[in-house]
Each structure stands twice: as C-alpha cells, then as structure tokens.
C-alpha cells in the first residue's frame, strides 16, 4: 500500500509546485503589462515588443525569463492558445534586441522552445502555427550569430529538423529555411553539416514540401542561392531528389537516369527565378555553372524531340522542364559572368569555363538538328515539309521558346568575346544563327534574340563580317523579315536543310 501512496504524493507535490510557479509567473506578467488576465497581458506584450523602443524597455524587466517560465508551466496541448501567445511575445522580443537574446540564451530558451515545438506542435495532427511561430523565434534569435547559431543548430540537427521538414505546410517551410539559413550564415562548419549525408535528407524534404505547396519565398531562395548558386552543392541536392543508379570511372561519378521527378524541375525553376531577380548582384560559382550544363546534357538524352511542344515552361513533364530551366539558367549565367566567386582558383570567368567545356559546340549541334522556324517552314514548298510533320533528320522544339533559349545563350556568350565569335565561325555556325533572325510562332522573341546574337557575332570581328558578305546565292525562297536584312533562305535540294544567303 505504501508503494502506491508515495507516487500519488509525489504527483500531488509536483502539481502544487507547477501551480505555484504558474501563479508567480502570472503575477509578474500582470504587473509588467498592467493587465487583469494572463491572456490580455500576453496580447499587450506582443504589441509592445513589435516596436524597437518597446523591446528595449522590456529587456530591463526580465520579461523573456518570465515568459519562458510560463512556457515550461504550460507545456501541454490543452494550453495551446497561451503557448502560442507566449511564443509570439518571445519572437518579437528577440527581433534585433541583443539584451533579450542574451537573456534567452542564459535561460536555455532554445531547449524550452524546441520542447514546445516537438511536444505540442509535432503531434500526429501537426499544429502548424505553434511550429511556425516557434521557428520564427529561433530564426530571430540565431540572427545574433556566434554561439546563438550553434545553440539552435545542435538542438535541432539533424533529427528534429528532418521531422519538421516532413510536415507538408507552406506556413512551416519558409521559417524553417530561415532558421537553417541564419544558423549556417558565416559558419562553414554548419553548412558542411547541412550538405552531409545526415543533412541532405533535410534539404530534400524541404524541397518536396516547397514543390508540393509551390513555395518560392525569400528564405527558401536565400538558402538555395547560398547552397547551389554560390556554393558547390547543386549536383548533390539535384540528384538526391531521386535515387538514380551511378557509374564510377576513375573516381568520377556519372549519374544514369531515364526519368526525372517533379521536384527537380521545381528546384531549377526557383534557381532560375533567383538569377533573374538578382542578375546584377548574384555570385555564380564555376561548379554551379558546370553542374547545370551537365544536367542539361542529361535531360537532352531523355527528352523526346519527335513531338512539337505547344506551351511554354513549365509544360508539366519533368524531363522537358529540366531541359528548359537548365537553358534559362545558363542564359542568365552567361549574361552576368562578371560576378564570379573570389574563391575560385581559376582566373577564368564562368563563361570561359562553360565554353571550354564544350557549351557552344553542344548548343550549335542542338540548333542545327532542329526543324526550321515556322516562318521558313511556311515559306517552303508543301511537298518539301508538310506543316505538323517532321523529317526523321529533324528535331522538334519540345516547348515553346526552346530555340529562342538556345540562341539567347549563344548570343550572351558571344558578347565582346572574340574567341567565342571565332569558334562559332570555325564550326560553321554563322549561317545557322542568321537563320534565327525570323519570327517563329513556336519561339516568341526569336527574331529579337537572333538579331542580338548576330550583332554580337559581327561586332569587332572582320572575319565574321566577311563570311556574311561572301555568301553565294543559289536558288532561294523569300522571307519578308530576311529580305529587310538583305538575306534570303536557300533550301539545299539534296538534304532539304535551309540556310541563309546574301540577296544582293
């Protein structure tokens, strides 16, 4: 009998102790906020802590400690609303106020908040608001840097981060990215942890959630920019999204795939947006550029070029979207090549690296194997090429804009680069690119990109200018856009391929 009474007394004593703590905490909150109830006190503190002056004033009244004690006393789902309000108070107090952050550190606030997130938020039916506000609090706190970053990181990495990342919620995903980004910012060791075998599953789950809810918010973009564009982890992350078999040859791992998953084009679409938004400021690593080129070549092998695409990106078919977003990323990289990482060992800029890896030759071959633009197809005789059908020797554009994107990369690479201009001429690419200076229904703005490309080919290059002048006329069809440029379309009677010749 005594064995049963002792635990009952212990439980009773614990409840009394908790109620005493709760009563003392409540008194402090009512006093500091001049309120008549704990709920009202917390709402007042939330508003006061939104202002810099309010945060500073409250930092001298031990409010952080008081609210943390309240969280410890209420660590039950039955007190959900009070816990949520408490987290909001702490989140606002830690936003840029170093004294509140220091108090949070001394009171082991991270441990308390993580306990609330896991015990109340990460239930079988997750409480997204508890998790969201808790993460926002930890993000504001870790912005303080130094030991605060490690304090948060080692409480959550890797298992709790992974569990949170698996909650498919827009409300949670971006603040989770905030916490991870602020922890890793300026701390290479934590960044290495994140991209290790333990950390990569966290990133994969984040991307699966973000793709599922179509999230493209600022913290996700900052994190992906640091890891992929400025860093060297794009291949690890991209190929980890789907487990492909791999072949190792002399230490080089080649991924082999006959398919892609939807998260992969999603990742590339976000990276493309980042580059487009920050084209004048982004720092592009050589590894990122070469990895995207490798992904482009992988997609090229998979895509079916026998069917002409009827829509722009995204088309909703992963291989084609991977192909297209790889091209748009390369286009923007080659337009901002002056911004390369100071950590790169090579003195080459990113376009130098891409061109020396065979980018121009690869793109010219892609372009050369495509069926003619619609303007030229319509100008040719019906018995040569029937609209909507294709000769076995031609490829179709798998999405609207495919040809334009190829031409845009070549044009950007040729801008004030003599060696690129010369390579295009040496590979018989000038006539091919002149053919792109036409309107094409399947490729909006092809004509504008074609003219830009030809301009860059000719600028300051007498040999390229002579190559156009020396074109011979051999039997042609007229295309109005080309006539205005002094050119005409020639159809080879044997191969049925087209090229441009001087009409004068």
Image (spheres, rainbow, N blue to C red):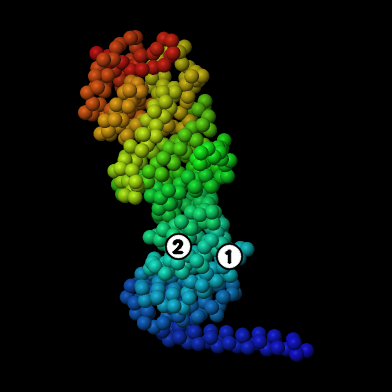
Q: Residue furthest front?
A: 250
Q: Residues within 10 Å of mark 2 (few under 14, many from 20)?
A: many
Residue 217 appears in which quarter of the rendering?
A: bottom left
x and y percentages locating residue 283 in the rendered image: 34, 48
The residue lying toward the viewer, choosing from 221 and 293, is 293
Q: What kind of element bears circle 2?
A: helix
The answer to which quarter of the image holds residue 337 is: top left
Nearer the observer, disc 1 or disc 2? 2
Q: Residue at x 50, y 87 (%)?
A: 24
x and y percentages locating residue 441 in the rendered image: 40, 27
Q: Is residue 181 visible?
A: no
Q: Residue at x 51, y 72 (%)?
A: 111
Q: Which residue is pictured at 54% across the width and 39% down the height? A: 248
According to the picture, the residue beneath numbered tag 1 turns out to be 122
Q: Name the residue tied to disc 2.
A: 179
Q: Quadrant of the N terminus?
A: bottom right
Side of 450 relative to 211 (left or right): left
Horizontal side, residue 3 vs residue 362: left or right: right
Residue 199 image point, x, y percent: 52, 56
* Image spot of residue 137 (x, y percent): 45, 68
Ranked by sequence position, the earlier of labels 1 and 2 is 1
Q: Is residue 115 left or right of residue 43?
A: right
Q: Is residue 329 above or below residue 1?
A: above
Q: Secondary structure at mark 1?
A: loop
Q: Is residue 26 above or below residue 419?
A: below
Visible in this render: residue 296? yes
177 or 215: which is nearer to us? 177
């Amino acid at each position: 009998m005594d064995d049963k009474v002792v635990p009952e007394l212990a439980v009773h004593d614990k409840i009394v102790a908790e109620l005493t703590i709760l009563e003392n905490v409540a008194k402090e909150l009512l006093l500091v906020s001049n309120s008549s109830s704990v709920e009202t006190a917390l709402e007042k503190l939330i508003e006061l802590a939104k202002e810099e002056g309010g945060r500073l004033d409250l930092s001298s009244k031990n409010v952080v400690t008081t609210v943390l004690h309240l969280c410890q006393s209420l660590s039950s789902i039955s007190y959900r609303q009070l816990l949520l309000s408490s987290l909001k108070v702490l989140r606002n107090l830690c936003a840029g106020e170093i004294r509140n952050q220091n108090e949070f550190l001394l009171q082991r606030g991270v441990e308390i908040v993580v306990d609330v997130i896991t015990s109340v938020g990460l239930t079988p039916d997750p409480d997204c608001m508890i998790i969201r506000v808790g993460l926002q609090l930890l993000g504001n706190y870790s912005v303080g840097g130094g030991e605060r970053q490690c304090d948060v990181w080692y409480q959550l990495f890797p298992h709790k981060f992974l569990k949170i990342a698996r909650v498919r919620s827009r409300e949670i995903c971006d603040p989770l990215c905030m916490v991870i980004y602020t922890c890793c910012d300026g701390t290479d060791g934590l960044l290495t942890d994140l991209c290790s075998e333990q950390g990569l599953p966290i990133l994969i789950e984040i991307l699966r959630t973000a793709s599922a809810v179509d999230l493209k918010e600022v913290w996700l973009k900052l994190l992906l920019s640091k890891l992929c564009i400025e860093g060297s982890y794009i291949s690890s992350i991209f190929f980890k999204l789907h487990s492909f078999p791999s072949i190792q040859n002399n230490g080089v791992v080649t991924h082999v795939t006959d398919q892609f998953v939807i998260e992969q084009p999603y990742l590339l679409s976000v990276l493309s947006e980042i580059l487009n938004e920050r084209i004048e400021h982004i720092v592009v690593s050589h590894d990122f550029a070469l990895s995207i080129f490798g992904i482009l070549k992988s997609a090229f092998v998979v895509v079916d070029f026998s069917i002409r695409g009827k829509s722009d990106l995204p088309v909703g078919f992963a291989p084609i979207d991977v192909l297209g977003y790889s091209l748009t990323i390369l286009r923007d990289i080659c337009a901002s090549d002056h911004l390369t990482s100071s950590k790169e060992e090579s003195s080459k800029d990113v376009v130098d690296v891409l061109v020396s890896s065979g980018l121009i030759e690869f793109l010219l071959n892609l372009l050369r194997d495509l069926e003619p633009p619609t303007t030229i197809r319509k100008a040719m005789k019906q018995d040569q090429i029937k609209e909507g059908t294709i000769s076995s020797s031609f490829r179709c554009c798998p999405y609207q804009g495919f040809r334009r994107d190829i031409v845009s990369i070549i044009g950007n690479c040729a801008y004030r680069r003599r060696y690129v201009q010369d390579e295009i001429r040496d590979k018989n690419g000038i006539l091919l690119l002149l053919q792109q200076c036409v309107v094409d229904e399947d490729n909006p703005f092809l004509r504008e990109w074609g003219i830009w490309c030809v301009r860059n080919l000719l600028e300051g290059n007498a040999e390229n200018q002579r190559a156009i002048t020396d074109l011979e006329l051999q039997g042609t069809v007229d295309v109005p856009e080309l006539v205005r440029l002094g050119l005409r379309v020639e159809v080879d009677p044997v191969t049925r391929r087209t090229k441009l010749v001087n009409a004068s």
